[in-house]
Image (spheres, rainbow, N blue to C red):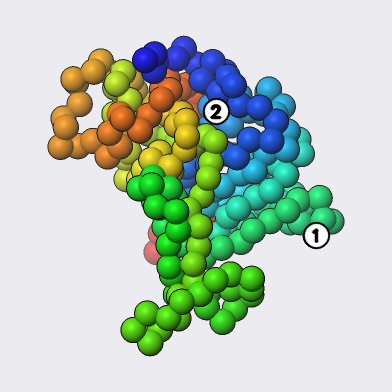
Amino acid sequence: MKKVYDNATDAIAGIADGAVIMLGGFGLCGIPENCIAALVQKNIKQLTCISNNAGVDDFGIGLMLQQKQVKKMISSYVGENAEFERQLLSGELEVELIPQGTLATRCMAAGYGMPAIYTPAGVGTEVAEGKESRVFNGKEYLMEYAFDADYAIVKAWKGDTAGNLIYKEAARNFNPLMAMAGKITIAEVEELVPEGTLDPNQIHTPGIYVHRIFQGVDYQKRIEQRTVRTRP
């Protein structure tokens, strides 16, 4: 099976209008910048995006929102994107906001082959409307379905030609969970090395989950909210 691709454009080939896509990252950390740029350039429409957040106006998923490529956004946090807010309030964008732990666990369930999970998060709130619940040991839990994503697009620090991935620091957030969960997983890495180079004890995502991999370029590694303090 061919896993190594030359660039992001080749790696996202086959993603069509209406696809359901998971996008790794947390804030602007560990997001698949190259693949997002390729999706923007290809101008694929009517996408359902599953991501912890929606980027900012001029970076990350925010670039896709600017081009009206996203039909539905499934996220736990969207507070840094003015265009997202505008589209939400105008009714142009369908939005499903869910607790962050539920988002992570629904990704994990998909990767483990579990159809659903039970969680106490959201019980007694609007999140619970229309959902099945059960009581375990006297406590109520909501049933939440595992995600069903066509593609998972993730960003890793280092990977090998077999698809094994290592994430660095805070980028080890939603990326490992989403890498397990897509029908087709696309990984972009800062450094691509030959198979057998990586220490097996350091690998976070085994290559069995990764279908396409390429070495990315020109990473910006932006900071969402830069805060500094004046020296005394």
Q: Is residue 230 visible?
A: no
On the image, the x and y values in percent for residue 72 come to 69, 48
Q: Is residue 219 left or right of residue 59?
A: left
Give the position of the C terminus as an image quadrant: bottom left
Q: Is residue 231 visible?
A: yes
Sequence order check: which comes first, mark 2 or mark 1? Answer: 2
* Of 178 and 150, the residue lying toward us: 150
Determine the secondary structure under disc 1. helix
At x 49% / y 67%, what residue is drawn? 143
Q: Is residue 12 above or below residue 88?
A: above
Q: CA distance from mark 2 to mark 1?
A: 28 Å
Residue receiving disc 2: 35
Q: Is residue 96 left or right of residue 147?
A: right
Residue receiving disc 1: 89
Q: Is residue 106 above or below residue 24?
A: below
Tell me the number on the disc at residue 57: none
Badge 1 amino acid: Leu
**Residue 216 occupies quadrant:** top left
On the image, the x and y values in percent for residue 66 come to 74, 39
Determine the secondary structure under disc 2. helix
At x 55% / y 28%, what residue is drawn? 35
Q: Is residue 83 left or right of residue 134?
A: right
